[in-house]
């Protein structure tokens, strides 16, 4: 077996591993985005308009600054 053949085989193998990992990462990202979209829709369907019930976060200085 020639050294150049082994090096070429390793390059192909490394690319295959990289491609597999990249594909898996993209799949997980798509699943995460789909889950976020489902949650967003569920929040909208529950009648709160996608906002949580804790409005204190909207007022950094505390609830006493509400208008």
Image: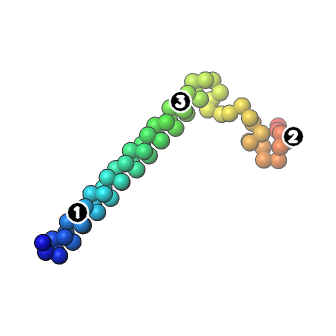
Report which residue position mark 3 lands on.
41
- Characterize the local packing of mark 1: few (<14), some (14-19) or many (20 or more) Cα atoms within 10 angstroms: few
Report which residue position mark 2 lands on.
64
Give how far apart the Cα atoms at labels 1 and 2 are: 63 Å
Residue at coordinates 24% horizontally, 66% vertically from top-left?
10
Q: Secondary structure beneath disc 3?
A: helix
Q: Quadrant of residue 52?
A: top right
In primary-sequence order, the first of circles 3 and 1 is 1
Q: Quadrant of residue 40?
A: top right
Q: Quadrant of residue 51?
A: top right
Picture quarter with the C terminus: top right
Numbered label tally: 3
Residue at coordinates 36% horizontally, 54% vertically from top-left?
21
Give how far apart the Cα atoms at labels 3 and 1 are: 43 Å
Residue at coordinates 15% horizontally, 71% vertically from top-left?
5
> In x, y percent, where is residue 26?
39, 48
In primary-sequence order, the first of circles 2 and 3 is 3
Seen from this angle, which residue lies furthest left?
1
Report which residue position mark 1 lands on.
12
Q: Secondary structure beneath disc 2?
A: helix
- Characterize the local packing of mark 2: few (<14), some (14-19) or many (20 or more) Cα atoms within 10 angstroms: few
Please indicate whether residue 34 sits to the left or right of residue 50 in the image: left
Tell us which disc is closer to us: 3 or 1. 1
- Where is 46 relative to 64, above or below? above
Please indicate whether residue 20 sits to the left or right of residue 40 in the image: left
Q: Are marks 1 and 2 in contact (CB under 8 Å)?
A: no
Picture quarter with the N terminus: bottom left
């Amino acid at each position: 077996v020639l050294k150049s053949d082994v090096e070429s085989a390793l390059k192909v193998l490394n690319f295959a591993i990289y491609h597999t990992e990249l594909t898996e990462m993209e799949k997980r990202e798509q699943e995460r985005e789909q889950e976020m979209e489902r949650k967003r829709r569920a929040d909208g369907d529950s009648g709160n308009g996608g906002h949580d019930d804790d409005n204190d976060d909207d007022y950094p200085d505390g609830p006493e600054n509400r208008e």
